[in-house]
Image: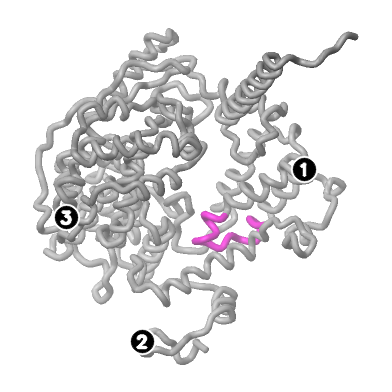
Amino acid sequence: MESRLLSLAEDWLRKQLKVAYLGLASLERTIARQRARISFLAEGDANTSFFHRQCTFRRQKNRVHSLLVDGHVLCDHEEMDQAAFAHFDGLQGTAVDREHTLDLEQLVTASDLGSLDAPFTPDEIWAAVQRMPAHKAPGPDGFTAKFLRACWSTIRQDILDVFEQLFLLRGRGFGKLNQALLTLLPKRADAHKLGDYRPICLIHIMAKLSAKVLSLRIAPKLDSLVSRNQNAFIAGRSLHDNFMLVRQSLRMLHHLGAPCIMLKLDLARAFDSISWPFLFEMLRQYGFGDRFREWIAILLSSSSTRVMLNGVPGPSIWHRHGLRQGDSTSPQLFVLAVDALGRLMHRALQTGILRRLHRRRTVLTVSLYVDDVMQFCHAEMEEVLAVKGILGIFEAATGLQVNYGKSSATILHGDEDSAALLEELGCQAANLPITYLGIPLSTRRPTATQMQSLIDSVAGRLPTWKAWLMNKAGRLALVKSVLSAIPIHQMLALAPPKKTLKQLEKIQRGFLWAGRAAAQGGHYHINWRTVIWPLALGGLGIRDLEHTGLALRLRWLWLSRTDADRAWQGLDLQFSREEIGLFHASTFMVLGDGHTALFGEDR
């Protein structure tokens, strides 16, 4: 076999081809990871059979084969594309006139937010780039935040120039950087209507970065602006604060024995329906400056979206109302706007339109978490009519409409007049327990039957993972990151029964050792009590669910003693002896003015 040294030109060409090949291979891995949407795999796992099957599975699962529109089944791509365009154009591309407005000076006290109008700084913009998720699916431009970080030294000045134009309110032409693609993901396996698909908005990286910078300016101000009964998207607050508020209010009303109604209200397409004029009225009343409101106006008015059906983008939809999901400012703006509902209900209590739930205690009558609304009122026709009237005024002013068909009413200590109240409300009756924010809600401790949905949620993850293609190390990673994490949401608020905890551990054991929800004793290699030990003690570091839940629930004892501004303060929280004992064993009190120290308990 003949061989020779490469010439200088050939050696140079070989190096160039190698660089090009490695670059294309890296790009192929990146595309494969985005197609599979698997976040727990390492860089070298991109060529495994599991990875490729996951890509194929996602492509087949997300494909729209047909749509049922007005009683007709559409299979042709152009017909489905036209139907999707008409549907989403009606939601966000059509302006809606308001019938009423609110006297916001009676509801909101203005704050000094002039500092938010300051010029954008390079450090501020770079901090926003670093805070953006690196591997989120890209928008129509194809760039991710990882690209911005990797090429920052090259593109830095171009991005600073864009923010300079934004600061000067030169929004003309910003629409080219504010485009988005709307992809449809099925909510269930038999999706056949547009309502059965979850729209996911993929925004241009420049619009995403602009919104991120503004959202980082808003974030520190939200805690002082938004009422305590709205806890979404605010640092230091939690969804579980809303659950504790509702559960303890429900228990208090149950023990009082007076007839009451708990309304679980559904706001129809809340993000898509919010009125822009109302939003800017609220921002002005909160104290946001003219320049900051203009920046928000530029982001909203220049936004356009194209529905991407089976990988093919449709015509552009220019937004005329609502907030675009995927934009960092959208949840913050929505929370600021919908807070008006809680303030309206509070104003109704102050003026005597609604009566207090408790004669001596100040109990909040409404709980808000984004668009999840829980409203308490007395089971009287006069009060029901008042609540419904307030909701009607709120709808006319904001564009946010209550869907009474999907709402429900739970009546405590009802009588023969309860049916008339439900008929007036126009919503269905719901008996306890119900599900609120993904957690069983009742006046008593949860039973194993009520917690069955948690078991089903954990077990339902297993079939989609194709465990027979994974080794034990991969299954261990999933047990730690997913199967052990799913129960935390409910365990933070409730103590699951022993039976539920045993079933959850059984699923973890079966998946780890045999790749399925249950396994025979011969598959278990090590005693489970040893498996859940920390790594330093010879275990595998899997969480002990019972002890994890116990530690998590200590936060309520801590917050009840250290944070007087929580929405549920003033209500009697209930704790087990084990929780109280562990709390006192883990803490000690430093004596100050004596207002929070308990003489008989603290040490």
Other residues around mark 2 within 10 Å, as few (<14) / some (14–19) / many (≥20): few
Q: Image height check: is 466 above or below 259?
A: above
| Residue 351 shown left or right of residue 596 in the figure | left
Type of amino acid under label 2: His
Instruction: Identify the mark nearer the N-term, 2 or 3.
Output: 3
* Disc 2 from disc 3: Cα separation: 35 Å
What residue lies at 35% left-to-right and 67% top-to-bottom?
566
Q: Residue 340, percent across and down?
A: 21, 52
Q: Secondary structure at mark 3?
A: loop
Q: Kindly indicate the quadrant of the structure image that contains residue 597.
A: bottom left
Q: Residue 327, percent across and down?
A: 35, 38
Instruction: Identify the mark nearer the N-term, 3 or 1.
Output: 3
* Disc 3 from disc 1: Cα separation: 56 Å
Q: Secondary structure at mark 1?
A: helix
Residue numbers of the magenta segment: 488-501
Cβ–Cβ under 8 Å for marks 3 and 1? no
Q: Kindly indicate the quadrant of the structure image that contains residue 424.
A: top left
What residue is shown with label 3? 287
Among all residues in the image, which is located at the extreme front?
A: 8
What residue lies at 25% left-to-right and 59% top-to-bottom?
225
What residue is shown with label 2? 595
Q: Image height check: is 499 above or below 579?
A: above
What residue is shown with label 1? 472
Choose between 360 and 364: the one closer to the eye. Answer: 364
